[in-house]
Image: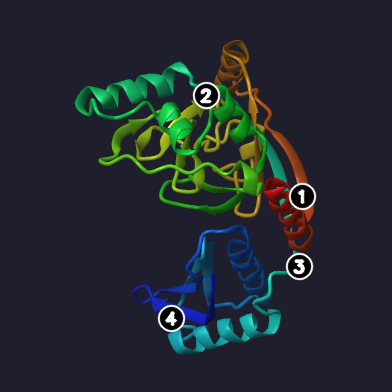
């Protein structure tokens, strides 16, 4: 839900958090990205960086060039000009990620956790139970039948927060409590209403369902997709997951190791929020029928 007005919170002497609402949905997040895009177009010289998040964004700035009060006045004026209505369009890439569901690495990770937490239900089975799915095959169909919106990046370089764009394909889950001490690189997880891809071996708390062999972070920038940066995904991209078998997954692992793997990326398209909202409404109506 959008707030009536923007809410500003200082983040030390060089940052400000701008909160637009308190929900976790596509329309609110799209409004965040529209505001960030408008600020970039305004080219306010004192702004060093803009970081879009789920329902807010952060601005880092040079306080020697602009005061906190003047900055929030500029931001509020741009927001008033572009409006809070959910409209317009943004450039958006479509990236297809191969996934080996219920792979050995995430299965071993779950098993390692249950050594000290024997009450933990295996992640895929827990997801089936919570979301009313018949079996793991139904979980794969639900997860892979929709595109996901890259709502935000953060917490670890390249770590993405993905929102399902099909309202009938959303999967929800509680997070681990306590969290895991390790997660395989490339693991696919579900936490709350979000999906994520773990860019590296890190601690974590999302329920695991598989692994992608296609990296989303490349510190050495060896692969073609990382020539312009260390991370693959950008806020406003879309992701589609493609199920693969163990043999293809092993082949992709080998291609990545050799520096030859080419990601499946459809370059920038213009993504219309109005067209999406009409489609989403039709999907919800179809589900009710």
Q: Earlier in the sequence, mark 1 or mark 4?
A: 4
Q: Tag 4's secondary structure?
A: loop
Reading the image, the residue beneath label 1 is 268
Q: CA distance from mark 2 to mark 3?
A: 40 Å
Specify the label residue 135 is tagged with. Answer: 2
Residue at horizontal 36 percent and vertical 77 percent from the top: 13
Q: Tag 3's secondary structure?
A: loop
**In front: label 3 or label 1:** 3
**In front: label 1 or label 4:** 1
Q: Earlier in the sequence, mark 2 or mark 1?
A: 2
Q: Earlier in the sequence, mark 2 or mark 3?
A: 3
**In front: label 2 or label 3:** 2
Instruction: Work out whether residue 49 or residue 249 is closer to the camera in this orientation and state it.
Output: 249
Reading the image, the residue beneath label 3 is 88
Instruction: Work out whether residue 106 or residue 142 is closer to the camera in this orientation and state it.
Output: 142
Q: CA distance from mark 1 to mark 4?
A: 35 Å
């Amino acid at each position: 839900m959008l707030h009536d007005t923007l809410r500003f919170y200082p983040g030390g002497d060089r940052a400000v958090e701008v909160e637009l609402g308190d929900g976790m949905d596509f329309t609110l997040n799209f409004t965040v990205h529209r505001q960030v895009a408008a600020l970039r177009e305004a080219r306010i010289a004192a702004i060093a960086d803009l970081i879009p998040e789920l329902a807010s964004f952060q601005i880092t700035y040079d306080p020697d060039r602009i005061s906190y009060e003047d900055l929030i006045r500029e931001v509020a004026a741009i927001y008033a000009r572009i409006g809070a209505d959910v409209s317009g369009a943004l450039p958006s890439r479509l990236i297809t990620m191969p996934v080996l569901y219920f792979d050995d690495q995430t299965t071993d990770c779950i098993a390692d956790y249950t050594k000290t937490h024997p009450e933990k239900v295996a992640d895929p089975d827990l997801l089936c139970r919570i979301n009313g799915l018949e079996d793991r095959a139904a979980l794969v169909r639900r997860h892979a039948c929709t595109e996901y919106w890259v709502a935000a990046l953060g917490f670890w370089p390249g770590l993405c927060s993905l929102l399902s764009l099909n309202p009938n394909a959303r999967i929800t889950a509680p997070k681990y409590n306590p969290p895991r001490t390790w997660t395989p690189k490339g693991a696919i997880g579900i936490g709350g209403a979000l999906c994520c891809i773990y860019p590296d071996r890190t601690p974590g708390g999302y329920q695991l369902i598989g692994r992608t062999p296609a990296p989303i972070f490349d510190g050495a920038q060896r692969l073609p997709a990382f020539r312009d940066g260390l991370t693959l995904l950008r806020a406003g991209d879309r992701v589609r997951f493609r199920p693969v078998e163990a043999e293809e997954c092993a082949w992709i692992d080998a291609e990545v190791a050799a520096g030859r793997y080419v990601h499946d990326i459809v370059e920038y398209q213009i993504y219309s929020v109005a067209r999406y909202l009409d489609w989403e409404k039709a999907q919800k109506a179809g589900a009710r029928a």
